Image (cartoon, helix red, strand yellow):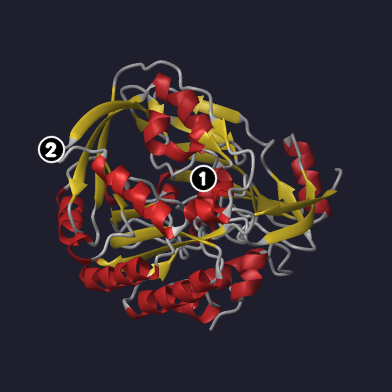
Amino acid sequence: MVWKNNEYSGWGRVLKASAELARPERARSLKAAVAQHPCPAIGNCRSYGDAPLNDGGRAIDMTRMNRIIDFDADTGVVTVEAGITIGDLAHVFAPRGWLPAVMPGTGFATVGGCIAQDVHGKNHHNEGSFGQHVLSVTLLNGDKRTVATPTRNAALFRATMGGIGQTGVIAETKLQLKPCPGDVMMVTERRAEDWDDHLALLDGSQATYCVGWIDTTAKGAALGRGVIEEAELAAGLLPKAKPSKKIPLDAPNFALAGPVVRAFNNAYYRRVPSSGRSSVKRIDDFFFPLDKIHDWNRLYGKRGFYQFQNVVPLDQADALKAMLELIAGAGLSSPLAVLKRMGPGRAGHMSFPMEGYTLAVDFPARDAAVDLIAMLEDMTMDAGGRLYLAKDALATGPAIKAMYPEHGDWVKQVNKADPDHALETDMVRRLNLREAE
């Protein structure tokens, strides 16, 4: 196996690493790489911070391990290598009547990455997290191969779901897909006039998929305004998608200046009529809208950006509103901000979801944003909420451990699976996650 030095980063492009990477293409070469140099596995690096980074060390790039191993057309059970992307699974199986039960906001996320972060989607309130639809996972540790399921090696399985890759290299997995009538969506958009209206629409939604875009620049009576999207899978066929666009250069700093963002947000809010509107969309246009713009992270300039995402319990909505007021007053956020209602579903000790409201906001990488995010972290902890490790680049270890009450159980399992700490990443070291409090 050839190891080559590479520089790479998380999607936010703020934190970077230089590491020797191996890119196996067959199960045999993957097994040899893991046995030769035990180290973390990475996918398409769509986690925003340092979760996939191993600066000064080694990592195994799984993106060529992307085969479909087996599929049962009667039950919708599929076995795949961990490097296949969610978008590829959707494109292959939606026309055949099946779809990944949970899909994150990008189709470029690998299945291994979705397990490592126990990702959620626009249907979390109905169908839980990604790991709840995983039937088995095959892990490689040195020369050891272990299969874990919800009932076999169950403690290891739970530590793997949302376990940020610390229990072993995920080689392959068996997933339960969900039936779907076709590869299109019926989508309804409605304006939310303010914070209370936004929450009322989220709470009252009966749709399978529901997500809110929120205008984080709006203040006063308009605080919390946005657009609610509700959607259902439908039968049909739309023309092929137009070719993706590519951002060729890092955008200048003024591209996301306050007046520009406010103008864009106002136009985006008003593009939906006050009476609402319905449309038919391709599956990927609904689930992965930003994938149409390759390298969209370059819009934040060469310094990159941070994303802050938290979740607070349902009875802490006022605390989240106070955070939104702080964000609006700071004038730092971009047009990319999302508000969703989550259900209780989670598959692992370190899985992010809890029943409540989750807010995700992008901030250009500036000193003022670092200070703001630190305040938002403190407010989240005070509200009994937690931060999402797939998005984090700035949190403190004690805070994260306090937010995840099953952290100690996770530590026991990962230290048993990887006693030499060969799988540690920059994030794990930054937060000292392998040490129990």
Q: Secondary structure under badge 1? A: strand
Task: Decide if residue 16 is on the left or right side of residue 243.
Answer: right
Residue toward you, 247 or 21 = 247
Residue 261, percent from left and from top: 40, 53
Q: Quadrant of the N terminus?
A: top right
Please report the residue visible at 38 percent of the width from the left and 29 percent of the height from the top: 283
Q: CA distance from mark 2 to mark 1?
A: 46 Å
Residue 317, percent from left and from top: 23, 68
Cβ atoms at labels 2 and 1 below 8 Å apart: no
Q: Which residue is mark 1?
A: 136
The image shows residue 51, relative to residue 288, as above or below, that is below
Task: Decide if residue 359 is on the left or right side of residue 251.
Answer: left
Residue 365, percent from left and from top: 56, 63
Q: Which residue is mark 2?
A: 275
Name the image quarter holding residue 269. top left
Q: Amino acid at mark 2?
A: Ser
Q: Amino acid at mark 1?
A: Ser
Please report the residue visible at 50 percent of the width from the left and 73 percent of the height from the top: 368
Q: Is residue 38 visible?
A: no
